[in-house]
Image: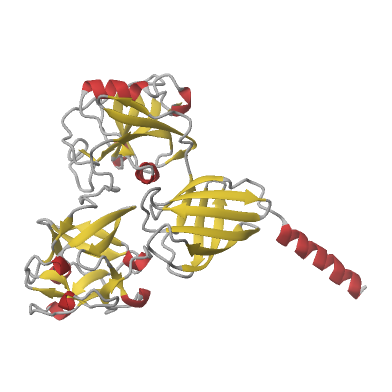
Amino acid sequence: MFRRVLVILAVIFLSAVSQAYTADLTGTWIGNDGGKYYIRQLNNEVWWYGENSPTSPAWSNIAFGNIMGNEIMLKWADVPKGRIMNAGTMTLEIISPNKIVARYKTGGFGGSEWTKGYDETEIPLTETQMGKYKAVFTPEGITWEDANRAAHSMGGYLATITSAEENAYVYSLVANDVRFWYKDGYGNGIGPWLGGYQPQGSPEPAGGWSWITKEPFTYTNWANGEPNNAGGAEDRLHFFGHQMLASSKWNDIGRNARLKGYIVEFGQQQTGIGVESDFYGNKFYRIISRHSNKCLDVSGVSKQTGANVIQWDCHGGDNQSWRLIPKGHGYYMIVAKHSNKCLDVAGIGTQDNANIYQWDCHGGDNQLWKIVPKDSGYRLIVPKHSNKCADVDGWGTHNGANVKQYSCHGGNNQQWKIE
């Protein structure tokens, strides 16, 4: 009897372990690290290749693993198409056929969430004297931020419209394709995403609207009564049909709405601009402490991994010049010009007084920083992993005062001007 029970339990266990996830994960996925991932599922095996650029990636990686229930156990490694060379393991959770999140990571892997994306083969690239455009259909829906990252990974950006002629042409890409449209509960047509956004804190409902390329937001084509900030959280732009399925008019809508597509533009504008970005990814900035008027500085102009970050009299040197690279959801990697290393919280520490230094860029949460506006152009600089603030130790005003993380209190030694 005991042997029979063991056999039955063993059969049940092996059946559960070997059962493959029923939905096919095969497809193109977009990670919150700005990368594009090509995933292939064969029964309960998963293979992928990921990269953050098809031409000159900072990183590219491969992974292989097995599905067990709703989890994927992966081994991954960077490959030499990119500059970064790390490796490790991951446990991923399958939230839905279109969303995967990381529950455990080793080796400094940057991404933590993946969205099954878009079919970029549906609508071909078209070119006019105004530029090159692609309409991308997403049958499962896509948020503005995911669409923005997807456009960036394709080498473009969400379309920006600066004239009636351009608006008419961009609209024509989707005007007669019902896949890009659906009706809301009021009979209005909800069309694809465009590259307009309203920065946080802008006067509602019409203040502050901007293009992600920083082109002047002068031409507009709002639908009657729009923008109206209905519900208090509408800060992204899309095509909209008032009481009809499709129209070239515009509407404001919440960034987390899942629309059926988006329009990508390929042109001369800087394509490194990220979600709600006030900064260009190819420009260098000084970061100046409000309380001391000194600059964020890599000590001794060191290029070494682990070199300390301090404040020092501003002199404009490369060790005081920082590039802010948008990584989505309002986060940035902050990269020193002289060393090409990233601002990093030491040891991924979450405690008060954890040191801030430079480290090889890997895109982990302790290298992702949210830039939070305060008054008079100053900002808090908040690491994603700890939600604490970059802080000048002891409110020191002298050269060499250390920079660390500390619980956010909004004092002047935690406020920085980025210019």
Instruction: State the residue at coordinates (23%, 48%).
Output: 200
The location of residue 406, given as percent across then percent down, is 25, 74
Considering every residue shown, the one lying at the far right of the view is 1
Q: Which of these two is toward me, 378 or 29?
A: 29
- 123 relative position to 359: left or right: right
The location of residue 39, given as percent across then percent down, is 55, 50
The location of residue 257, given as percent across then percent down, is 40, 39
**What number of labels is visible?**
0
- 30 relative position to 213: left or right: right
Residue 19 lies in what quarter of the image?
A: bottom right
The location of residue 55, given as percent across then percent down, is 37, 48
Residue 136 lies in what quarter of the image?
A: top left
Quadrant location of the N terminus? Answer: bottom right
Residue 256 lies in what quarter of the image?
A: top left
Q: Which of these two is toward me, 271 or 408?
A: 271
Q: Is residue 367 visible?
A: yes
Quadrant location of the C terminus? Answer: bottom left
Instruction: State the residue at coordinates (62%, 45%).
Output: 24
Q: Which of these two is toward me, 411 or 86?
A: 86
- 184 relative position to 17: left or right: left
Q: Which of these two is toward me, 103 or 27?
A: 27
Q: Is residue 231 above or below residue 29?
A: above
Q: Is residue 403 above or below residue 194?
A: below
Q: Is residue 224 visible?
A: no
Instruction: State the residue at coordinates (22%, 21%).
Output: 164
